[in-house]
Amino acid sequence: MAMSKTTSTYNRTNWEDSEFPILCQTCLGDNPYVRMIKERYGKECKICARPFTIFRWCPGARMRFKKTEICQTCSKLKNVCQTCLLDLEFGLPTQVRDAALKIQDEIPQSDVNKEYYLQNVEKQIELNDGQMPNSSGKAQAASDVLAKLARTTPYYKRNLPHICSFWVKGECKRGEECPYRHEKPNQPDDPLSEQNIRDRYYGVNDPVAEKLLKRAASLPVLEVPSDKTITTLYVGNLSEHLTEVDIRDQFYQYGEIRNVTLVPKQQCAFVQFTKRSAAELAAEKTFNKLVLGGKKLSVRWAYSQAKQATSSSQSAPLRPRIDPRLDPVPGLPDLPTPNDYFNLNATDMMILPPGLKINQIPQQFLPPSMPGPSGIHYPSMDPNRLGSLQK
């Protein structure tokens, strides 16, 4: 009996056949030469349940193998990675991004509506030459929360192997050859241990996103100094290829700059504004938000070193002078005078005329603290030692 086609029957023309996955830098790994295994229509997408081409690869040494979890159509709809489902632009969960940008998710979650919605999206992609029209994941406006929480560098620790279940039970016999991690797992009541792909994709009840939102609420705030004469900002964590012109071009938009001092050895710079209002505006707009040269820069107020030294000397109490001499060792006889091996405490000094050596002066004319020919301190000064020159 032939089966009739229904709305849930897959149409092979809509199955995805791609040549390369959509991945973030963290999932791709730090190795520029990656060998991938490609399988056409290997699995169903965990969001739309349509067969798609999966890719499997190893992102680096001592890392676990990773594979694509969702199709490219679902990835483009949310602008997320096909493997970790994090935002491609900020490296954050979709719940954090949507909450910061105030984006409302319009993707249906029921099977029939989802299939109809995806078909219309694919038609629009074909009409726009492969471009996604009005993707909900594209950032249309700047956000302070995203600028503070966004990752500017890959986080390769996310690719580490899973925890060895045999080691948790105390039964792992592989030792160092075990390809899995020997670490204590999260507690069962830990919310981070309950994660799933659908909640991460739709941005609902994501424990990682809730943790990041709590961190954003408790971020430190840069305090404005009470001294109105301070108009200089400290900019740290600079990359090596940044120049004074790059820093000036970044900060001139907040006000007139008097001077920019670059310290390459310390990887920092000092930006001095002509007005205090311009410095306050620059500090407010760049604190925990400034990314320049691929690195997130640290911006703080710069204080005068002379004022810091004066305030520290006034506030710090005077310390008593510590005697550098050591305490006598119990059981040994006490010496009448401290051991001054190198004659550092000698008070009577003698200046020799040029051309005259100390071993040419009779002992009775030398001060008692200065050694003569008979007062040999080092073995190399002994004339009877092997290798010495005798005159």
Image: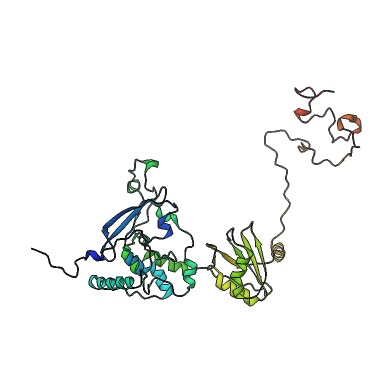
Percent position of residue 115, x then y? 25, 70
Q: Quadrant of residue 80?
A: bottom left
Label tally? 0
Side of 307 relative to 291 (left or right): right
User: Could you tell me if residue 111 is visible in this image?
Assistant: yes
Side of 353 relative to 15 (left or right): right
Q: In which quarter of the image is residue 319?
A: bottom right
**Is 256 situated above or below 307?**
below
User: Could you tell me if residue 161 is visible in this image?
Assistant: no
Percent position of residue 174, x then y? 35, 41
Percent position of residue 106, x then y? 33, 75
Q: Nearer the viewer, residue 312 or 83?
A: 83
Q: Which of 44 and 340 is in front in this view?
A: 44
* Residue under the image location 41 percent in, 69 percent down: 96
Side of 319 relative to 28 (left or right): right
* Residue under the image location 63 percent in, 66 percent down: 245
How are the residues colored? rainbow
Percent position of residue 222, x then y? 57, 70
**Is 103 situated above or below 150?**
below
